[in-house]
Image (cartoon, grey):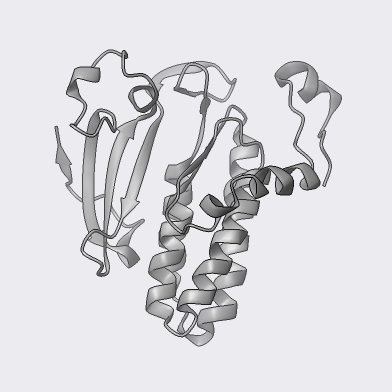
Amino acid sequence: MTQIKSRQRVADHGEVFTGEREVRAMCDLVSDECLRIDSRFLEPACGDGNFLAEILQRKLAVVKEKYRRSPYDWERNSLLALGSLYGVDILADNCAHCRSRLYKIWERAYRSVCRRECSDDTRRAVRFVLERNIVCGNARTLRCVDEAQQDTKVPIVFSEWTFPQNNAFLHRKDYTFAELLDEEAPGAAARNSDGEGTFVQEYVCHYRRLGEAEPAGQET
C-alpha cells in the first residue's frame, strides 16, 4: 500500500496515508471497541479508508462468528457494523475509493456467509449506507465541498443507524456534524436531552428497502 499518491497531492492537501502496520497497531490500542459491532468510529481525514477498512474487517469477523448460521441476522448486523463507520475527506476520488473499498470488504464477507441467499436489495442498502457515511467535505469547517474542494453552504450531516425493535426495520436519524461536535454551536439549544446534536430528520423502513426513493420521514 503506497502512502503517497503524488507529490502534488502532498503539496496541495498534505495527503500522506498511514501505513498498514501503524493502522493495525493503533486499532489494537482500542481493540475492544473495534470488536463491538455497533461501536462508532469517525475518521475526519479518511483518505481511501485505511483505518475504516481495518476496523470493518475486525467487526465483520465478529458478525461472522456470531451469526454465520443465519443470513438474516448476518445481514442486519453487518449493516450495523457498516453504519457505525464514518469518514470525511476533502477529495472526491478518495471518498469514492473509500466507499468502494469498504463495499468490497463487505461483499467478500457476504458471499462467504450467505452464498445462495445473497440479495441485491441488501447490496443496494449497503451502498446507500456508505454514500451517507462517507462524505466529501471539510472536517475543519464541517461543510460539504464542491469539485474544487471549496466549502459550500451545505453542512455535513451524518446518519445514526439502529434496529431499535430488533426486527427488520432500520431506523435512521440524521444529525448535523457541527452540532455533534460543538455544544456551543448555533442551534445547540435544540439538542435532545442526551446531547446527541440537533435532530434533522428520521426515517424507518425495512433494511432491504434502503436506497429506494426516500420516504417522507419526519422533520423538526
| Place of residue 6 in the rendered image (x, y in percent of width and height, measured from the top left) | 83, 29
Residue toward you, 42 or 98: 42
Residue found at x 32% / y 14%:
185
Q: Is residue 114 above or below residue 199?
A: below
Q: Indicate the quadrant where residue 88 lies.
A: top right
Residue toward you, 184 or 150: 184
Q: Is residue 73 left or right of residue 52?
A: left
Residue toward you, 136 or 42: 42
| Place of residue 164 in the rendered image (x, y in percent of width and height, measured from the top left) | 23, 58
Q: Is residue 170 left or right of residue 44?
A: left
Q: Is residue 21 above or below residue 65?
A: above
Residue found at x 81% / y 22%:
8
Q: Is residue 167 left or right of residue 137?
A: left
- How many marks do you count on the picture? 0
| Place of residue 59 in the rendered image (x, y in percent of width and height, measured from the top left) | 54, 60
Q: Is residue 190 above or below residue 184?
A: below
| Place of residue 105 in the rendered image (x, y in percent of width and height, measured from the top left) | 62, 62
Residue found at x 52% / y 50%:
33
Residue found at x 80% / y 47%:
21
Residue toward you, 60 or 153: 60
Q: Indicate the quadrant where residue 159 lies.
A: top left
Q: In this view, does 37 lie above or below 23?
A: below
Q: Is residue 49 visible?
A: no
Quadrant (top left, top right, bottom left, bottom right) of the C terminus: top left
